[in-house]
Image (cartoon, grey):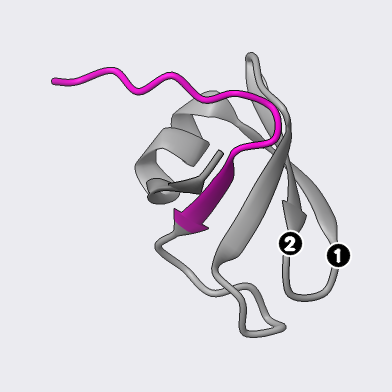
Amino acid sequence: MEHIVYNVGDVVRMKKLHPCGSDIWELTRVGMDFGMKCQGCGHFVRIPRVKFEKMVRGIVEG
């Protein structure tokens, strides 16, 4: 399985929509957990790396 390297500032598309309707997020923290900012409403979330890697579709820009 291919390992993708994520960096702070990357913009990613997730499988599920945020309640605001956006599936585009900017990474604000990368490590054991990921900090993400919704590009639709600006909401911040932090999720564990394992959960992030299951939910991410790929990098949109970065």
Q: Are marks 1 and 2 in contact (CB under 8 Å)?
A: yes
Amino acid, disc 2: Cys
Q: Quadrant of residue 35?
A: top right
| Local SS, label 1 | loop
| Local SS, label 2 | strand
- Asked if residue 50 lies left or right of residue 7, the reply is left
Q: Is residue 50 magenta?
A: no
Which residue is painted at 54% across and 69% down in the image?
23
Q: Quadrant of residue 34?
A: top right
Q: Residues within 10 Å of mark 2 (few under 14, many from 20)?
A: many
- Asked if residue 24 lies left or right of residue 34, the reply is left
The image shows residue 14, relative to residue 48, as above or below, that is below
The image shows residue 49, relative to residue 42, as above or below, that is above
**Prevailing secondary structure class for the magenta stretch in the rendered image:** loop
Q: Is residue 2 magenta?
A: yes
Q: Position of residue 21 (x, y in %)?
A: 62, 84
Amino acid, disc 1: Gly
Residue 38 got which mark?
Answer: 2
Please state, as top left, top right, bottom left or bottom right, where the C terminus lies in the image: top right
Which residue is painted at 46% across and 28% down in the image?
50
Residue 42 got which mark?
Answer: 1
The image shows residue 33, relative to residue 24, as above or below, that is above
Please state, as top left, top right, bottom left or bottom right, where the N terminus lies in the image: top left
- Asked if residue 54 lies left or right of residue 52, the reply is left
Which residue is painted at 53% across and 74% down in the image?
17
Q: Residues within 10 Å of mark 1 (few under 14, many from 20)?
A: few
Q: CA distance from mark 1 to mark 2?
A: 5 Å
Count of number-bearing discs: 2
* Nearer to us in this view, 5 or 51: 5
Q: Which residues are magenta?
A: 1-13
Q: Quadrant of residue 19?
A: bottom right
Residue 20 got which mark?
Answer: none
